[in-house]
Image: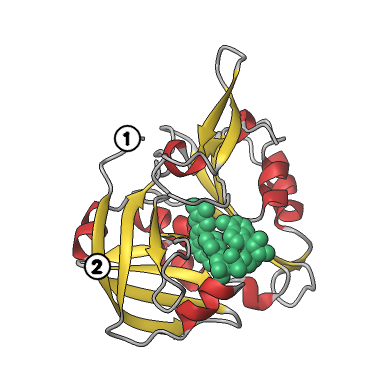
């Protein structure tokens, strides 16, 4: 998990494709960042139309293809609502690719991806780049929170879907499907996860090697301002104050002090 230097690039918006309600797939022409990006990394975007002092917004990289990169965003507030109004050819000021990215699965371990909501974005990129396949556990409140399943299936992943209202897959939370499966699966597994804090916390209780992507409010995105500090247990038992933007966003789940 090395940190290549990040880039500052003016990207051009090429398309905005609404997915299910509230989620949008946004594609950008950003040749330099697209070339360097690795799964689990993110971009920090200045959103045109917000006042000039407004903070950048971080988004995981969902995919890269040649000179383009894509993100999936959920409309939750001022910045993402403004992002949704932008038309093709709008210029966006980006820094990236930022963060450490996911490590490769250990030899012999079946990769298990655990996803909630827009957490699918970095794990879609991860699955597209991995030479192996495994199991995807994807959950949401309702069917419109379940994204990109067809891509994972085409890649050969076994997909397990849960929704809290039973509108797709089995009723319950993603851990309701994962835990029984883990109990019956005797071979080694390694979990890679991105989603809401509650889900990540539950995963950090498991006795399974697990990597989680933390979604923490951040300001500078490059490790300078200390706005996104997270306490992380060190191998010697001490607790370090690490920066999610620079030292993460991916951490070994059991090391996180919640
Ligand atoms: C490393 C990283 C990767 C991310 N990847 C994605 C992604 O792929 N797709 C996506 O849709 N979003 C992603 N996010 C979250 C995204 O940055 C926020 O949703 C966005 O900044 C909200 O901006 P806003 O102005 O629309 O909302 P605001 O008006 O700022 O806030 C609206 C609501 O969202 C909450 N919120 C804002 N920022 C965050 C945050 N970072 N984490 C949790 N809650 C937040 C606020 O508390 C508030 O309740 C990521 C965040 C991080 C740190």
Q: Which residue is mark 1?
A: 2
Is residue 24 visible in the rendered structure shown here? yes
* Residues at marks 2 and 1, CA–CA distance in whole angstroms: 24 Å
Q: Cβ(mark 1) to ligand 1 < 8 Å?
A: no
Q: Is residue 189 left or right of residue 60?
A: right
The answer to whether residue 232 is left or right of residue 63 is: right
Q: Which residue is at 73% across, 46% downward?
A: 179
Residue position for label 2: 10
Residue 111 vs 247, above or below: the answer is below
On residue 192, the disc is: none
Considering depth in this image, is 178 or 4 the residue closer to the camera? 4
Coordinates of residue 200 in the picture (x, y in percent): 66, 46
Q: Is mark 2 within 8 Å of ligand 1?
A: no
Picture coordinates of residue 158, whole percent (x, y): 54, 59
Rendered residue at 38%/51% (across/down): 39
Q: Residue at x 60, y 71 (%)?
A: 146
Residue 211 pos. (x, y %): 54, 39
User: In the structure shown, which secondary structural element does the residue marked by tag 2 occupy?
Assistant: strand
Quarter of the image where one finds residue 27: bottom left
- Residue at the location (46% across, 74% down)? 50
Of the residues tagged 2 and 1, which is closer to the observer? Answer: 2
Q: Is residue 137 visible?
A: no
Q: Position of residue 107 (x, y in %)?
A: 41, 32
Q: State the SS at label 1.
A: loop
Q: Nearer the viewer, residue 51 or 75?
A: 51
Judge the density around disc 2: few (<14), some (14-19), many (≥20) Cα neighbours within 10 Å: many
- How many numbered marks does the figure carry? 2
Badge 2 or badge 1: first in the primary sequence = 1
- Callout 1: 10 Å neighbours few (<14), some, many (20+)? few
25 to the left or right of 170: left
Label 2 close to label 1 by CB (< 8 Å): no
């Amino acid at each position: 998990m090395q940190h290549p230097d990040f880039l500052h690039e003016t990207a051009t918006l090429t398309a905005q494709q609404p997915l299910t309600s509230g989620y949008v797939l946004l594609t950008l022409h950003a040749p330099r960042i697209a070339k360097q990006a690795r799964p689990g990394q993110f971009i920090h975007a200045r959103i045109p139309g917000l006042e000039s002092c407004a903070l950048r917004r971080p988004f995981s990289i969902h995919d890269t293809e040649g000179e383009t990169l894509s993100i999936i965003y959920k409309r939750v507030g001022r910045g993402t609502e403004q992002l949704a109004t932008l038309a093709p050819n709008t210029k966006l000021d980006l820094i990236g690719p930022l963060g450490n990215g996911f490590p490769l699965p250990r030899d012999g371990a079946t990769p298990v991806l655990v996803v909630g909501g827009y957490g699918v974005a970095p794990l879609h990129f991860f699955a597209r780049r991995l030479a192996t396949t495994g199991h995807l556990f994807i959950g949401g409140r309702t069917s419109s929170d379940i994204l990109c399943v067809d891509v994972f299936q085409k890649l050969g992943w076994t997909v397990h879907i849960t929704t809290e209202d039973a509108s797709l897959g089995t009723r319950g939370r993603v851990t309701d499907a994962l835990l029984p499966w883990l109990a019956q699966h005797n071979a080694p597994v390694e979990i890679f996860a991105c989603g809401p804090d509650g889900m990540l916390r539950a995963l950090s209780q498991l006795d399974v090697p697990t990597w989680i992507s933390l979604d923490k409010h951040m300001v500078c995105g490059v490790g300078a301002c200390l706005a996104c500090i997270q306490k992380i247990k060190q191998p010697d038992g001490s607790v370090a104050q690490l920066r999610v933007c620079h030292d993460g966003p991916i951490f070994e789940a059991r090391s996180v002090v919640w």
